Amino acid sequence: MTARLAMIAGLAVALLALPHFVGPYFMHLLIQILLWGFVYTSWSIMGRFGFVSLGHGAFMGVGAYVPALLWNYAGLTPWIGIPVGVGFAVLLGLIVGYPCFRLKVVGHYFALVTLALSQVVMLSIVAARDVTGGSLGFTPKAVGHSWFALQFPEKIYFYAISLVLWFGGLAVWYWIDRGIGREALDAISEDEEAAASIGINVIREKLRVTLISAALTALGGAIYGQYMMYLNPETVSGIAVSLQIVFAAIVGGTYAAVGPTVGALLTISLNEGLRVAFGTNFIGAANTIYGILLVLFIIFMPRGIVGTIQDTIKGRRRGKAAFYSAIRRPSSADQ
Amino acid sequence: MDIYLLEAIINGILLGGVLALLALGLNLIFGVIDVVWIAYADLVMCGMYLIYYLNAELNWPLLLACAVAIAWVAALGVLVHVLIIAPILGSAPINQLLATGGLLFFLQSFATLLFGTDFRNIGVRLPIIELSGIYISSSRLLAFAVAVTGAIALYFFLRRTFVGTAIRAVAQDRDIVGLMGVDQRHIYLVTSAIGGALAGLAACLLTLQYDVHPFIGNTFGPLLFMICVLGGLGDMIGGFVAAFVMSQIIAIGGYYFSTELSYVFAFTFFIVLMFVRPRGVFSR
């Protein structure tokens, strides 16, 4: 336990000291990793229980576009705009989530309903091109350094904000992991009928993690928009973003707190590394490798990088029996 | 009735033909193997690129290129099953869906790597037919006719042949059918090949109407899954009907509003219907 605390303290010091040593380009990468890590963690809050949503692009899109639209057209500060956007995302999650859970839309069906949701949001943004700029994207009005507008040209501010956000995401993850609802959610992911029969309120428990997950994802989208100062329906909503979220979380490891962050670290470094190595001659090289990796991960390491490392350590410590029980996969959690 | 509306409706029916063909393939695979191939629309893209390459770059005759493309996509279908689905057949179905999602990333980026993001076409355009003021594209008409013929052929194959009967039996109960002496692994391979061949056939028909680019699968892929779920995953007749319902929503919505809004309507309609009939509209 002390080793663990020391590790966390070391990491915190490193993260706080880092901005003094790296240039703006690496700051940009760090902010991206932290922000996307936060979004991926938000997804895994529900994803780890087997509720695979392909609709998180919808929440992110709503979270990003609502504050930006309110700022440009009504002059409303993001301090109000972001909570409004998060509120809309939660409402959207409720409208789609409640009937889904009530009617036991699970597995494939849940994935495809949420996929439709992310397409609805993306296409709505494109269709409302008079207001949102359509697929050309949307640029919030820049006012320079301003707390009121939540705009900071210097990267250090957004580094601090993303760090806090990322840490908050991990805290929520742990809060749910250690909470009383955790057992209930585990039971639901094993067998919904059985969970209901022992008095678990299946709909309420599922809805709770879904709405938390949606709210955090929308928050991540909002801060991402404030940082990038440019929104595009393809990059903050729709099927592409939804899949990106799911895959990065799975590659890193959905069942461990830092797994999704490792996923963000890996995918963003891979993308940047290949971009720097090959230049623009090989557009698609990064995603080609990424696609192969994904398939391999799902086949050979369904618990992701962090999950597999944890299993190996546990296996060494406790011997073979514990190892085998850790890698046992639910075979029909979906039915 | 407004003549342009009529034109939109007819075009919707013609578009529905190709969608119905693809929905049949996806439904066949789901019904038999219990897997959703998220990358199904991207297999169509692979077929379209092969036709483009053989016809426009190597100057092969179009019909020969199409025949090769059907065989090629059928082979791809088998490869998808052997390399990706078979190793994880025993794990949670959602994992299989996600693994083919990885394939989607791979195929789209690999196509970008090989061909770039340019829109390419084979330069063959069939004439437009005018019928008392209504303009119908004959490539769409041909696509519709071939798609319906393909669907009927598949129906007879499943009903009248031994392999077809075995496929239907696996779809009904994959465990018991093994006891009857049917090798499921063999049936899975045949089904994947047929699913791939249907995607290849759709590629031939779509090449005549659309330019091919790496992300063309994204334009009709999501719609395809909605059609299959709407008809009831695995229910082939349901999927066939749902294809025409969805294409009508898109054609008429596109006529009155805009293309994007018509898709918004189609997807919203899908979500709402899922809440009314969670196991498919035509489920009993």
Image: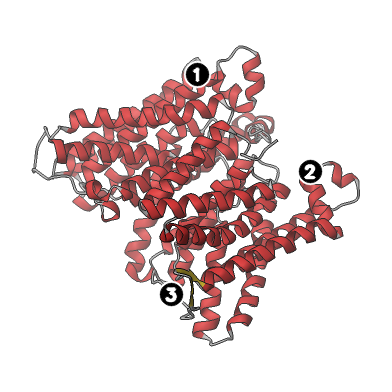
Left or right: B257, with B211 as reference point: left
Residue A121 point in image, percent of width and height:
37, 42
Task: From this view, report whether residue A105 is shown above or below residue A292.
Answer: above
Task: From this view, report whether residue B240 is shown above or below residue B62.
Answer: above
Residue B19 point in image, percent of width and height:
57, 58
Secondary element at image label 1: helix
Q: CA distance from mark 2 to mark 1?
A: 34 Å
Secondary element at image label 2: helix
Q: Quadrant of residue B70?
A: bottom right
Quadrant showing the N terminus of chain A: top left
What chain does mark 2 sit on? Answer: B
Q: How packed is label 1: few (under 14 Cα within 10 Å), some, or many (20 or more)?
A: few
Q: Amino acid at mark 2?
A: Gln
Residue B25 point in image, percent of width and height:
65, 57
Q: How packed is label 2: few (under 14 Cα within 10 Å), some, or many (20 or more)?
A: few
What chain does mark 1 sit on? Answer: A
Secondary element at image label 3: loop
Q: Amino acid at mark 3?
A: Arg
Q: CA distance from mark 3 to mark 2?
A: 42 Å
Quadrant showing the C terminus of chain A: top right
Q: Residue at x 50, y 38 (%)?
A: B271
Q: Residue at x 55, y 52 (%)?
A: B224
Q: Residue at x 58, y 38 (%)?
A: A109
Left or right: A173, with A80 as reference point: right
* Front position in the image: B67 or A184: B67
Q: Which residue is mark 2?
A: B172
Same-chain check, marks 1 and 3 = no
Residue B100 point in image, percent of width and height:
57, 52
Q: Which residue is mark 1?
A: A204
Marker disc for residue B120:
3
* Camera-side mark, 1 or 3: 3
